[in-house]
Image (cartoon, grey):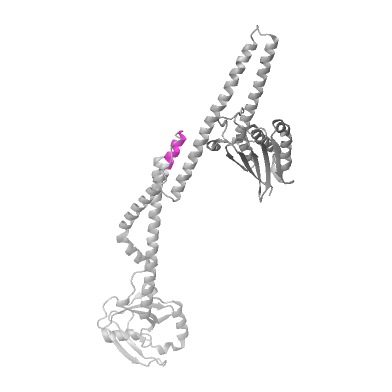
Amino acid sequence: MLSKMKSLSVKITLVYVFFTLLMIIGILSYVEYHAAEADEWNVHLRMETSFAYINGATPAEYNSQLGILSDIFNSYHITPRFVLDNFTPLTESSWSGVTVNELGKISGDGHNYYSLELGTSKVGVLIISEQSFNDTLDTFTGYGGWRKFYYMPIEGYDDVIILATLDNFFSLGKSWPERVWYDLTPSFPVILLLSLLTGFLISLLIVRPVRHIAKSAEALGKHNLDRRVKVNSNDEIGSLAKSFNRMADSIQNTIESQKRFISDAAHELKTPLASMKTTVTGAMDSEKSPQECQELLSFLSGRINTQEELIGSLLFLARADEGRLPLDMKAINLPDVIRETEDAFRYLYEDKNVELQTEMEAEIPLMADSKMLFQLFSNLLDNALKHTPSGGSVFIKAVNEKDSVSIEVKDTGEGIPEEHLPHIFERFYRVPGTNDNGFGLGTAICKSIVEAHGGDISVKSEQGKGTVVRIRLPLIN
C-alpha cells in the first residue's frame, strides 16, 4: 500500500513538473514570438529591397521586362527572416573603401541610378535605384557604410539579382524558438528544482490524507470499527473523509445491529426451546396420565406455533435486508386495503371498547403489494389496540398529496417516552414497562414494508396522550 502511495506522489509530482515547464515554455514562447515579430517589423521598416543590375547591365535594357520582373520579385515574399535564411551574404568584410557613383537618369524611367562598387563584392559593380535604396546610399555617402547586403539570383536572368540591405544596428537576431531556448537554458535547472519541490509538497498535501483514509479503510476491514478519519478541511479531500466516516458509521451500525439481532434472536429462541424440551421430557414420563400428557402436548403445540411465527418474522426481515421481499406490485386502491384491515380488526376493537375511525378519499391509486400493505396496517392497528385503554380511540387518515399519499395512524393510548422513540424501529426492542408480549419485531417489519415500497415511516408520541405513526408512499405517476 505504501509503495503505491509513493508512486502516486511521484506521478503527481511529475505531472506538476510537466505542466509547470509547459506553462513556462508557453509564456516564454508567447513573449518571444511577439518580441521577434516586433523586431521583424522594425527591421522591415528599415530594410530596402529591389533589383540590382550587374555585369555592366543597365536598367534601360530591362524596361520592357519590368512587369515580369516585378511578378518574380513579389513571388518571393521577401521578409527580414527570409532574407537572413535564404539570401546569400554579398560580403562579410567591412565596408570601408566603398565607392558610390551617380549615373544619372540612364533608364528613361525618371529614376536616378548609382553604381555601387564594393571591394569584396562577389558579383562585381551593382547598379541600384536611388528611389529603392535611398537609405543605403545615404549611409554609404554619409557614414562610410554601416549596412549589410544580401542577394539572390533570378533564374533566367544572369544580369539581374534581387538585392536586400539591412543596417548593422537593426539586423535581425535570433528566431523566437532560439530566443526561448536562450532564455530557458541558464534558468532551467532552477525552474526544474523549484517545480520538483513544489510538486512534491502538493503531492504530500493530496496523498497524505488519502493515505490516512486508506489506512483507516484497512483497519475497518480488520473489524476495527471505531477507526475514523480526522477532517481538517472543507475541500474535496475533506468531503472524501466525511463520506468515509459516514460509511464507517453505517457499517458499524449495521454490524452492531446484526450482532444484537443475532443475540436477541438466539435469546428469543432459547427460552421457549428450553420450556419445550422440559415439556417433552415430562410427556415421556410413564407415570403421567393421558389427560396430563394431552395438556403437555397442547402446551407444546402452542409454543411451536409461537416459534413458527417468530421464525417467519425473522425470515421476513432477513429477506428485506437483502432486498428480496417477494413483492407483487400492482395498481391498487389504498382505501380498499385500509377498509379490509379495518374489517379484520373491527371485532377486536369492539370487544375492548376502543373506537376505530377512518377518514380518506374514495380513490387513492397506488402501485403496491396489497398483501404487504395489509400486513403493514394490521401490525399498526394491533400495536395501537394493545396500547390504547378501553374507552379510547384509534384514527386512520389518508390524504392524497401531489406525488405521494400521507397516512396517519393515531391513537389515544399510553404513549411512548421520548427517550425510547429513536429505538422504536429496532428489532426486538420493547419499551420497558409496557404489557407488550410480542417479539418486538412488528415495527421493524412495518419499516421494511414501507421502505420496500419506496416510502418512509416515522413516529411521534407524547406520554399519556397517545402516538402518531406517519407513513408516506409514492403515488402512481
Q: Residue furthest front?
A: 391
Q: Residue furthest top?
A: 287
Q: Position of residue 85 (x, y in %)?
A: 37, 71
User: In this image, 425 relative to 351: left or right?
Assistant: left
Whether residue 135 is in magenta: the answer is no
Q: Residue furthest left?
A: 96
- Relative to 87, say whether 374 is above or below: above
Query: Closer to the camera, 27 or 181?
Result: 27
Q: Residue at x 58, y 21 (%)?
A: 271
Q: Quadrant of the N terminus?
A: top left
Whether residue 215 is in magenta: the answer is yes
The span picked out in magenta is 213-223
Query: Closer to the camera, 226 or 465?
Result: 465
Quarter of the figure with residue 146: bottom left
User: In this image, 220 relative to 47: left or right?
Assistant: right
Q: Residue at x 32, y 84 (%)?
A: 136
Q: Is residue 7 visible?
A: no
- Relative to 296, say whether 257 is above or below: below
Q: Residue at x 31, y 86 (%)?
A: 138
